[in-house]
């Protein structure tokens, strides 16, 4: 049987702001932080409620020093979870409140992560998130900024934010441009029940899709996703908390795998969701009681990572 605790793990969908350590946030805010301010509990009923937990962490990501220290502490916090490689994502445009540029934000996070890597041996790739509620021009500027760091710590682009209010079709130009420049991307899609967003993500040429739950509504599209080898980054605990999945009994992981889709299991937000990779993988094992399935999702993570990782 797999020893989930000791297994060297990959986490491909992990938001920096939702995964900050509470002691480091307390240091940066100069006050105590109650868990209820930055974590949801089992009573969470919507994505809107879930998103209120990001206000405080975002305040801690506004200066070069804080970004660097938070990024370093984040990587260190992954040691007990036996993470071997993490793809950590954040939206540089949310860290401009005290005058930093997107470029400076990315540089600061990369510096902190590099220091964390020296201390822990954990390798990383950064995914920069464009934001649905920002203008097309702002998102295109982010593309220019992140492109400079591509291959030097940054590995891909993502689109995050309120999917129900801002569908993927509004970002056609952004992803056309990303594709033209050969910048790999993943898109949060199908988290709020909208299968059309998954379809457009596939059409735009996404290498991976965040959550993708609504894909279960369309068998043909499932086949297309499998045929193209697109990775689906599922995050079970978060999906239950935001009601993206109504219950574990209806969780479509098994159906996606049966269709041959490369699904990986990830944390989404370690602090907000109070989770770890060990917890997510244990949840999947307890739900399906299928060791082979567990091995498959681990293999899928290796195969769909943006940076090739030597397997152990
Ligand atoms: Zn996410």
Image: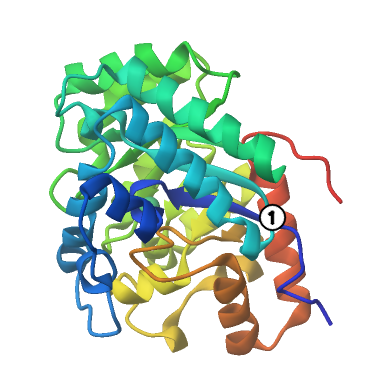
Measuring from the top left, give residue 244's x and y in whole percent: 31, 69
User: Is any atom of residue 119 visible in this view?
Assistant: yes
Q: What's the residue at 73%, 35% (across, down)?
A: 308
Tell me: is circle 1 under 8 Å from ligand 1: no
In what element is the residue under mark 1?
helix
Measuring from the top left, give residue 87's x and y in whole percent: 55, 43
Q: Is residue 178 above or below residue 289?
A: above
* Residue of label 1: 300
Q: Residues within 10 Å of mark 1 (few under 14, many from 20)?
A: many
Q: Is residue 265 above or below residue 154?
A: below
Name which quarter of the figure residue 305 lies in: top right
Q: What's the residue at 59%, 59% (across, down)?
A: 263
Give the side of residue 26 with respect to residue 213, left or right.
left
Assign the N terminus to one quadrant of the image: bottom right
Measuring from the top left, give residue 139's x and y in whole percent: 25, 23
Q: What's the residue at 76%, 66% (across, down)?
A: 7
Foreground pick, 57 / 132: 57
Name which quarter of the figure residue 130 lies in: top left
Foreground pick, 115 / 186: 115
């Amino acid at each position: 049987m797999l020893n989930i605790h000791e297994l060297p793990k990959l986490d491909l969908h992990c938001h920096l702001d939702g995964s900050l350590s509470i002691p480091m946030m307390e240091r940066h805010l100069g006050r105590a932080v109650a868990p209820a301010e930055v974590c949801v509990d089992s009573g969470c009923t919507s994505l809107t409620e879930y998103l209120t937990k990001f206000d405080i962490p975002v305040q801690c990501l506004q200066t070069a020093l804080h970004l660097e220290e938070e990024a370093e502490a984040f990587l260190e916090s992954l040691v007990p979870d036996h993470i071997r490689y993490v793809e950590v994502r954040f939206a540089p445009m949310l860290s401009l409140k005290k005058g930093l540029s997107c470029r400076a934000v990315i540089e600061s996070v990369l510096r902190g992560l590099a220091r964390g890597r020296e201390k822990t041996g954990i390798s990383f790739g950064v995914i920069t998130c464009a934001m649905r509620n920002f203008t097309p021009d702002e998102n295109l500027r982010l593309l220019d900024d992140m492109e400079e760091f591509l291959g030097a710590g940054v590995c891909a682009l993502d689109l995050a934010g309120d999917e129900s209010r801002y569908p993927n079709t509004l970002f056609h130009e952004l992803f056309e441009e990303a594709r033209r420049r050969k910048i790999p991307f993943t898109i949060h899609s199908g988290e709020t029940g909208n299968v059309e967003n998954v379809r457009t993500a596939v059409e735009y040429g996404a290498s991976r899709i965040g959550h993708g739950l609504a894909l279960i509504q369309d068998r043909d599209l499932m086949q297309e996703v499998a045929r193209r080898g697109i990775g689906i980054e599922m995050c079970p605990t978060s999906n239950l908390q935001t009601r993206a999945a109504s219950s574990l009994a209806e969780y479509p992981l098994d159906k996606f795998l049966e269709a041959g889709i490369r699904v990986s299991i990830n944390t989404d937000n370690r602090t907000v969701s109070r989770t770890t990779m060990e917890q997510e993988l244990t949840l999947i094992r307890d739900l399906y009681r299928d060791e082979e399935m567990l091995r498959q999702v681990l293999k899928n993570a290796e195969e769909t990572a943006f940076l090739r990782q030597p397997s152990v």
